[in-house]
Amino acid sequence: MRFLMRGLVGLALMAIMVGFAGFGAYRLYGAMTVEEAARERPARERSYTVNVAPLTPQAISPVTIAYGEIESWRTLQLRASSEGRLVDVASKFRDGAAVAEGELLLRIDPADAEFQFLDAEAALADAEAQKAEAEEAIVVAEQELEAARRQLNLRKQALERQSQLKDKGYSTAVQVETEELAVASLEQSLNNRLQSVIAARRRVERMDLTVRRAKLALEDAERVLQETTLTAPFYGYLAEVDATLGRRVSPSETLAMLIDPTALEVKFSLSTAEFSRLLDQSGKLIKAPVTVTLQLGGRSVEVPGRIDRAAAIVSEGEAGRMLFATLEIEAGTVLRPGDFVKVAVEEPELANVVAVPAAAVTEDGRLLVVTEDERIDEIRARVLRRMGNEVLLADVPFGTDYVRERLPQLGKGLKVSPRRGQGEEPEDTAPVTASASESAGQPAGDLVALEPERRAALIAQLTNSNMPENRKARLLALLNEPMVPKDLVDRLEERQGRKG
């Protein structure tokens, strides 16, 4: 029995050895067959699939991006014009409230102002009465002056008659001297009456000045009385409100700030190079259009405007220029002074330039182009602007196709398969496409329809592979399409054969 068991174990071991030897011989034969087939297959030149686009001349207005702050050029400090107690405060007199032009905001106790107004009115009435009295005194003085002149004329006539009578011997010298003394006395009286008229006229002039002063005092008292009520001089929003009912305020005390929401401008800074692009031939700043963007979470608010002026000085430690742009604001805007915004400045138009993706050109302006025999050549262009993901170039061979993305494996003289009219290929799938073209030798861009079993096998292979998740997701998306790139299918099946 023991001999039988040993014989069976020996036969089993013999069968296992024969099986391993046969499997080794099979693998050796398969490897030799694959190497022979590889040696017999002719070598193919490596070809890469690249996305290309033509270099077409364009007229483009570059856009410079800056960041700035919203300011208001029309801000008013609401101050108390006189001392007193606040007896009335409007319900709208609060921070952030919108007030209309002429709307009553608050009132200071008008008792003192009303007393001054009534006193000024009384002083004006007294001055006008004194002026009327002075004007009447002029009339009386002029009448007395006229009477004194008539008396003087009569005395002179009497003196002349006495002189004639004396010459004829009918009058004495004493009578003539008496008439002469009477004439002298009347002349003195006439001078006194004339002086009274002049004094009356001067008094009227003084009373005119007194009436003017009384009117000015009345106007000032009326102004003080009106200023006890504070109204909004224009439409705007209130800020920094500091007023409560019953509080006593002093003259010139700031009670609030009134900001005009339609008088906003943006202040932003540009570098010296960016500022130089906004100057005309004579060196004057152009009124370039701007677009101000305010980000409010997932929503953005855009407001147009134009550059208005540059700052008068350059602050210490700063470079470039500070610019101000006026905005076309409508009532009810959400912009407020102090908002941090993005400013897009539209520069003058550039002709005969081309915009290419930033991934297509190096920092020094080197660009890959495709020659007529579908090989890569490298040129150097002049970089004008860098705007986000685009670069503006000049001095390029217009009409030539350029490579939209500089991949590490691309170089001068390489054979490529241009792909036009499509967007940039994902970075993760580009190496796979290039490798598939190298191994299968098929034209780039061929699409094939897969049988359900074949598609399921490729999807299962990708799912179980150790490929990065982002690349795996993109390839699975391609395999789920109705038409699948043939070079991708060949590449995956080749990898599956190697594993088998």
Image (cartoon, rainbow, N blue to C red):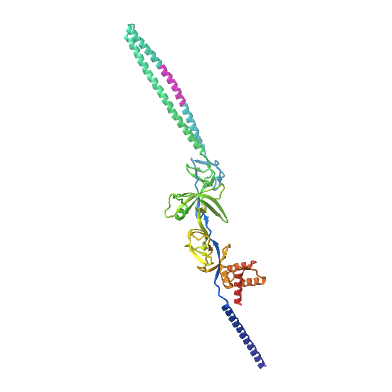
Quadrant of the image occupied by residue 461:
bottom right
Tell me if residue 98 comes above or below residue 298 in the rendering. Answer: above
**Quick one: 375 or 330, which is closer to the camera?**
375
**Residue 466 point in image, percent of width and height:** 58, 72
Segment tinted magenta in the rendering: 131-148
Q: Is residue 144 magenta?
A: yes
- The residue under the point 44% across, 28% down is 207
Magenta: main secondary structure equals helix
Which corner quadrant holds the N terminus? bottom right
Asked whether, in this view, residue 285 is left or right of residue 31, the answer is left
Asked whether, in this view, residue 211 is left or right of residue 6, the answer is left
**Quick one: 71 or 222, which is closer to the camera?**
71
Q: Can residue 193 be seen in this view?
A: yes
Q: Is residue 215 magenta?
A: no
Asked whether, in this view, residue 117 is left or right of residue 12, the answer is left
**Residue 426 point in image, percent of width and height:** 57, 65
- The residue under the point 44% across, 21% down is 139
Tell me if residue 180 comes above or below residue 458 in the rendering. Answer: above
Quadrant of the image occupied by residue 105:
top right
**Residue 296 point in image, percent of width and height:** 56, 54
**Quick one: 341 or 327, which is closer to the camera?**
327
**Quick one: 99 or 418, which is closer to the camera?**
418
